[in-house]
Image: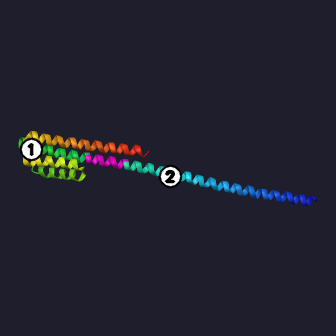
Amino acid sequence: MSEWGIALIAAGSAIAGSVVTGWYTRSAGIRQAAAARHAGDRQADALLESVHMTLRADSSHRKLALRRQIYADFLGAAETRILTERNGRGQADDAAVLQRALSGVLLEGPPEAAAAAQHLVDCLRRHVKPDELTHAKQEFVSVAQESCQSSTGATTVRSTSTS
């Protein structure tokens, strides 16, 4: 075989080897790009889930703060009416303030707190004995505290179970 033939065979082998190597390199690059894209998608999903969890926790805290404020407003209005029952001195709009505060509790709930608040207002309207008023007020306070504590516990469980 002549030198030209050997050179052509060597050149052809080099070109064929380059094509095969290039093809496998291209395939490996495509697989690496797909893996990187998949890892990026997982990281983005994890970030979005983290943001959603934070927003849910913030929303739960705002709802709990609003519920506590509504309960405190109702309790303040009820206490004003209880004092009015005891000493006969009060403001003309005490009944309206109590009714607005009751409406807040009825809307915010839960049903147990709404029922306890309604019972306290009913006791005030019927002018029951002071001991019964104190008992009705304590019942509302107990239900309200339980409601706020169970809301806090549910938030904690939900946050830890999804992480």
Q: Single out the residue that lies furthest toward the right.
A: 2
For the C terminus, the image quarter is top left
Give the number of the mark in front: 1 or 2: 2
On residue 150, which mark appears?
none
Proximity of marks 1 and 2: CB atoms separated by less than 8 Å: no
Question: Which of the two residues, 100 or 45, is positioned nearer the viewer here?
Answer: 45
Q: Residues within 10 Å of mark 2 (few under 14, many from 20)?
A: few
Question: Which of the two residues, 151 or 60, is positioned nearer the viewer here?
Answer: 151
Q: Position of residue 47 (x, y in %)?
A: 47, 50
Residue occupying the point 68% across, 57% down: 26
- Find disc 2 in the rendering and name its residue: 44
Q: Position of residue 37 (x, y in %)?
A: 57, 54
Q: Secondary structure at mark 2?
A: helix
- Find disc 1 in the rendering and name its residue: 84
- Does residue 58 belong to the magenta stretch? yes
Q: Earlier in the sequence, mark 1 or mark 2?
A: 2
Residue type, label 2:
Ala
Tag count in the figure? 2
Could you tell me how far apart the alpha carbons at marks 1 and 2 are, in whole angstroms? Answer: 60 Å
User: What type of secondary structure mainly makes up the magenta span?
Assistant: helix
What kind of colouring is applied to the model shown? rainbow
Residue occupying the point 18% across, 49% down: 115
Left or right of 87 in this view: 42: right
Q: Position of residue 55 (x, y in %)?
A: 39, 50
Examine the image and state in which quarter residue 68 appears: top left
Left or right of 154 in this view: 46: right
Q: Position of residue 141 (x, y in %)?
A: 20, 42
Residue type, label 1:
Thr
Q: Residues within 10 Å of mark 1 (few under 14, many from 20)?
A: some
Q: Single out the residue that lies furthest toward the left.
A: 88
What range of the chain is rendered magenta? 57-67
